[in-house]
Image (tube, grey):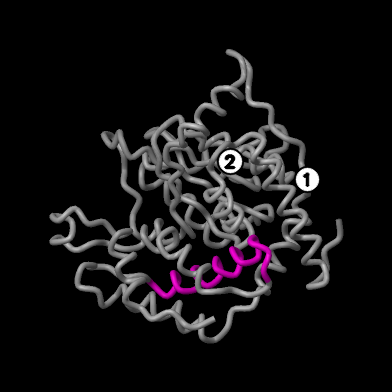
Amino acid sequence: MSLTGKADVPDAQRVITEIKTAIAEVIVGYDKPVELLLCALFSGGHVLMQDVPGVGKTTLAQTVAAVSGLDFERIQFTPDLLPSDVTGVNVYLPDSGEFSFQRGPVFTNILLADEINRATPRTQSALLECMQEGQVTVGGETRQLPRPFLTLATQNPVEMAGTFPLPAAQLDRFLMQLSLGYPSREDELEIVKRSPRSGQSVQLPDPVCDPRTLQKMSDLAEGTFLSEELQHYVVSLIRATRDHVQLRLGASPRAAVMLARASQALAFVRGREYVIPDDVQDLTVPVLSHRLLASEESVLRHRDAASILQQVSQEVSVPEE
């Protein structure tokens, strides 16, 4: 497929429909997380997925990579993991007397950073340059990562012993934080019916596109129309988090840029060439909640950033469509 401009938006929407259909053959009952994951893929963002074990985070990442024709790598983060295990290392070759760079698993399209908070801060920071700049610098030499590049990091909210919480600077690099949650009874029954036999892996679908097509679709998503009124709306939401009495840390200007960019991508995934207020509102919690810190009083009242954000959204006036 060749995508070159706005005239190719219908073709792009056909590809998105095929991607969703192929993913639904493997992943049951998670239509909204899949939509948001595609939004992150088309907007060049990264995703932090905080969920209990066994809900399908790894299978979801593998399936998205498979249907998109993207390379996939997985890193199991542990306390003894070194930065070079992520980015790569220069290896001395005695025969030639030279150093050869052995690429790490980060040189891929979709990187699953499994239980990222179990690695030390030093190893976690190895991903900062990768996520922000799309490159790796080792031994004074900078190497570009493949395009597109998506980091899907997971955290287990149940077992926190022996973990290293992600610092605010790293959390701010993630476009959004998602949670799959438990499926409905009907969806869980379907999962049981589809589950492979013992010892067999999940049958991943065939690709419906390739990295080059995805990159062109990302360019189309970036061109989705975002009106000046909605730009003001995004900024108003961001600034309201800084002045809210129940928050001690509001969202940064980077958050405003990411919310606007994600809104364009979400509108594109939903088949529109323009953003509407619903797109911004649907992304407010996923894009902003992990960047905020609730006040001590709010924590004592068991109010988290997500619930406070919902209140903020109600207080900020919504522009008319």
Name the residue that disc number 2 marks: 61
Which quadrant of the figure contains the C terminus? bottom right
Asked whether the viewer can see residue 139, the reply is no
Viewer-proximal residue among 106 and 273: 273
* Mark-to-mark CA distance, 1 and 2: 16 Å
Image quadrant of residue 193?
top right
Q: Decide: is 198 above or below 311.
A: above
Q: Residue at x 43, y 46 (%)?
A: 179
Image quadrant of residue 316?
bottom left
Outermost residue to the front: 186
Asked whether the viewer can see residue 308, the reply is yes
Q: Residue at x 46, y 84 (%)?
A: 232
Point out which mark residue 208 bears. Answer: 1
Point out which mark residue 64 bears. Answer: none
Q: Decide: is 315 above or below 45.
A: below
Task: Please report whichever mark, 1 or 2, sits nearer to the chain's N-terminal start.
Answer: 2
Residue 212, x across and y down, in percent: 78, 56
Asked if the stretch drawn in magenta spans residue 230, the answer is no
The residue stretch that appears in magenta: 252-272
- Which element is circle 2 on? helix
